[in-house]
C-alpha cells in the first residue's frame, strides 16, 4: 500500500470513529476542506507531515497514535 492511500484510509477511519464528516474534520483542524478532501480521495499523492500534525492537534491526538495503525505496517517505497 502507498503512504497516501494509508493516510486516506486512516482519515476516513478517524471520521467514522468520531462520527464527523471530512468537512467537519477540516473545520476542527483549521484546514481547508479541499486539503482534507484531497487526502481522502487520494488526490494528494505526497501529503505533508505538517498537515497530519495539524489533524492530530485538532483532534488532540498524539502524532504517534495517528501512525500506530496496521495500515502503516506495509508501506511500499515510492522512489
Image (cartoon, helix red, strand yellow):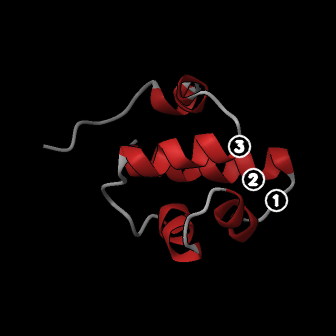
Dot 2 crowding, Cα within 10 Å, few <14, some 14–19, many 20+: some
Q: Quadrant of the N terminus?
A: top left
Going 60% across and 62% down the picture, which residue do you hit?
Answer: 30
Q: Which mark is residue 59?
A: 3
> Badge 1 local density, few (<14 within 10 Å), some, or many (20+)?
few
Quadrant occupied by the C terminus:
top left
Q: CA distance from mark 1 to mark 3?
A: 11 Å
Q: Is the residue 42 above or below the residue 59 in the image?
A: below
Label 1 near label 2: C-beta < 8 Å? yes
Q: Is residue 48 left or right of residue 26?
A: left
Earlier residue among tags 2 and 1: 2
Q: Position of residue 26 (x, y in %)?
A: 64, 64
Judged left or right of residue 60, residue 6 is left
Q: Nearer the viewer, mark 1 or mark 3?
A: 3
Secondary structure at badge 2 equals: helix
Q: Earlier in the sequence, mark 1 or mark 3?
A: 1
Tell me the quarter of the picture where residue 68 sits.
top right
Residue at x 49% of width, y 69% of height = 35
Helix, strand or loop for disc 3: loop
* Residue drawn at 67 percent across, 53 percent down: 12
Q: How many marks?
A: 3
Nearer the observer, 14 or 49 = 49
Q: Report x, y in % for residue 11.
A: 62, 50
Task: Give above or below for 2 relative to 24.
Answer: above
Label disc, if present, on residue 20 of the rendered structure: 1
Mark 3 closeness class: few <14, some 14–19, many ≥20 residues within 10 Å: some
Label drawn at residue 15: 2
Amino acid at each position: 500500500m502507498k503512504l497516501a492511500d494509508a493516510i486516506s484510509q486512516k482519515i476516513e477511519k478517524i471520521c467514522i470513529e468520531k462520527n464527523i464528516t471530512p468537512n467537519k474534520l477540516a473545520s476542527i483542524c483549521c484546514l481547508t476542506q479541499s486539503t482534507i478532501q484531497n487526502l481522502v480521495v487520494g488526490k494528494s499523492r505526497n501529503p505533508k507531515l505538517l498537515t497530519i500534525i495539524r489533524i492530530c492537534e485538532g483532534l488532540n491526538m498524539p502524532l504517534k497514535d495517528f501512525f500506530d495503525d496496521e495500515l502503516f505496517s506495509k508501506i511500499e517505497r515510492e522512489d
